[in-house]
């Protein structure tokens, strides 16, 4: 797409967008009695309009059937997480049996590490990106302590080169090779939540495994944003949350991928009855018999009300198609970048890689000054973006509900504040 810096171009691009009607499937926060423009889908996705009825359905089942709801009703709760696997598998590029839904992201990261981080005196190191999301840092640090290690001996953080903000993939690969005798696990955020950098997941996965380590991924900022091929890439495990690009509401149940090569009963885990084979689950007998797929990691009764919104939201992903969403997303974020560069100003720097294959929807802008003023001006104009000290604004146009016109209006205001448009 050849971009133009005009409102007419933005509106024409929206007219030609096959996915434009999906916007009507969402509720927008209100600003001066009209829809705000929303660029925080990387933090909390908007509410799909079909969620309310979906919740009502389960409330009705509970009211009418009570305990019978596990076996009867519109969607029997016994296997509620099963309803989500097919759609999620398409989004992450897996077999439905390699995906499950349970708990929440950090909890799942711990459970996966309990299965796949098996430190020995020789091989005990964990590699991650410096500046990983704090919850991931805490998880890894406390796993190290849990096994009696000093986290400083265990954790290898890969940092950008001096004066830079983005990691070089060759630095990651080099570090993996340098630690090949002691590396047990790599756990990177597929997209760094802050910089928006998308790592080469198959490349890093292959290098980690070549070195004899397990490759795990935190896909919080990837799932529903950038399509992946977790099965074909031979990823060992991955975890993600459902409330960012997957639009499933605060605290929605998290997602897990476990490659089928690990799904046999021999893989150790901390278990609960919902991961037990259904044939014997209700016999209430001794002896855990894991289901031979990712759902063998489920522990507790399906958290139906934390999954209803996800189920409703996934219907939209099924309709839109992940590849179509990605194509629109590349154009939309490309347009955002193009307009920002058209401001021809040194007042800010785009930290996110300019290569569209090395980022998702989000751009991270670092303003040397006026960052706070720009954020305030955007919010006053009903444009919701994320601000972090010092001077960082993250803008994530989610392709399901953001438009080219939204992007145009946003950059117009930034230009007005900077006095460069
Ligand atoms: C959003 C996010 C989290 C949040 O974890 P929860 O357990 O869902 O609160 C963790 N890690 C990363 C990389 C994230 O982006």
Image (cartoon, rainbow, N blue to C red):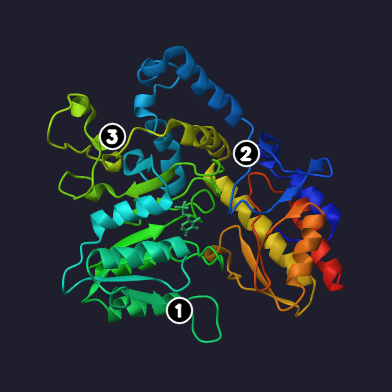
Whole-percent x, y for residue 233 in the image: 35, 57
Residue 379 drawn above or below residue 288:
below
Upstream in sequence: badge 2 or badge 1: 2
Q: CA distance from mark 2 to mark 1?
A: 36 Å
- The structure residue drawn at horizontal position 20% and vertical position 72%, both measured from the top left corner, is 123
- Which quarter of the figure has residue 138? bottom left
In the picture of the structure, the residue carrying the numbered disc 1 is 159
10 Å crowding of disc 2: few (<14), some (14-19), many (20+): many
In percent of width and height, residue 122 lies at: 16, 74
Q: Earlier in the sequence, mark 3 or mark 1?
A: 1
Q: Secondary structure at mark 3?
A: helix
Q: Which mark is residue 194?
A: none
Residue at 58% from the left image edge and 71% from the top image edge: 353
Residue 1, placed above or below residue 129: above
Q: CA distance from mark 3 to mark 2?
A: 29 Å
Q: Is residue 188 visible?
A: no
SS class, disc 2? strand
Measured from the top left, where is residue 357 in percent x and y?
A: 54, 63
Q: To which residue does mark 2 refer?
A: 47
Q: Which mark is residue 274?
A: 3
**Residue 65, relative to residue 20: is it above or below?**
above
Looking at the rendered structure, the number of numbered marks drawn on it comes to 3
Q: Which corner quadrant holds the C terminus?
A: bottom right
Q: Secondary structure at mark 1?
A: loop
Judging depth in this view, the residue of 148 and 254 nearest the camera is: 148
Residue displayed at 12% across by 33% down? 286
Dividing the picture into quadrants, the one containing residue 55 is top right
Q: Earlier in the sequence, mark 3 or mark 2?
A: 2
Q: Is residue 404 visible?
A: yes
Q: CA distance from mark 3 to mark 1?
A: 40 Å
Rendered view: 64 above or below 143 = above
Residue furthest to the left in view is 286
């Amino acid at each position: 797409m050849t971009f133009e810096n005009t409102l007419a171009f933005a509106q024409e691009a929206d007219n030609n967008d096959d996915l434009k009607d999906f916007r009507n499937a969402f509720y927008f926060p209100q600003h001066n009695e009209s829809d705000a423009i929303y660029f925080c889908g990387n933090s909390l996705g908007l509410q799909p309009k079909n969620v309310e009825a979906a919740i009502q359905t389960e409330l009705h089942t509970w009211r009418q059937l009570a305990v019978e709801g596990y076996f009867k009703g519109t969607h029997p709760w016994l296997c509620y997480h099963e309803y989500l696997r097919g759609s999620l598998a398409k989004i992450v590029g897996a077999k439905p049996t390699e995906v499950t839904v349970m708990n929440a992201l950090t909890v799942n990261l711990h459970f996966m590490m309990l299965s796949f981080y098996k430190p020995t005196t020789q091989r005990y190191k964990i590699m991650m990106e410096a500046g990983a999301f704090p919850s991931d840092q805490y998880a890894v640090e406390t796993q190290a302590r849990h096994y009696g290690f000093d986290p400083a001996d265990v954790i290898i953080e890969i940092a950008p080169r001096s004066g830079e903000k983005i990691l070089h993939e060759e630095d990651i690969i080099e570090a993996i090779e340098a630690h090949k005798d002691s590396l047990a696990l790599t756990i990177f955020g597929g997209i760094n939540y802050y910089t928006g950098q998308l790592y080469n997941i198959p490349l890093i996965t292959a290098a980690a495994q070549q070195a004899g380590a397990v490759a795990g991924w935190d896909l919080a900022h990837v799932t529903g944003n950038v399509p992946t091929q977790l099965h074909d890439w031979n990823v060992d495990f991955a975890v993600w949350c459902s409330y960012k690009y997957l639009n499933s509401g605060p605290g929605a149940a998290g997602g897990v991928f476990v490659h089928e090569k690990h799904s046999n009963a021999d893989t150790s885990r901390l278990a609960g009855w919902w991961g037990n084979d259904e044939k014997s689950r209700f016999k209430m007998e001794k002896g855990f018999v894991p289901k031979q797929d990712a759902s063998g990691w489920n522990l507790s009764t399906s958290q139906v009300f934390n999954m209803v919104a996800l189920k409703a939201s996934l219907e939209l992903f099924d309709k839109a198609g992940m590849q179509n969403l990605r194509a629109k997303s590349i154009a939309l974020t490309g347009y955002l970048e193009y307009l920002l560069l058209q401001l021809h100003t040194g007042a800010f720097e785009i930290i996110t890689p300019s290569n569209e294959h090395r980022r998702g929807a989000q751009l991270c802008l670092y303003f040397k000054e006026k960052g706070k003023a720009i954020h305030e001006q955007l919010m006053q104009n009903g444009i919701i973006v994320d601000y972090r000290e010092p001077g960082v604004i993250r803008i994530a146009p989610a392709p399901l509900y953001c438009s080219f016109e939204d992007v145009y209006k946003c950059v117009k205001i930034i230009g007005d504040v900077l006095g460069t448009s």
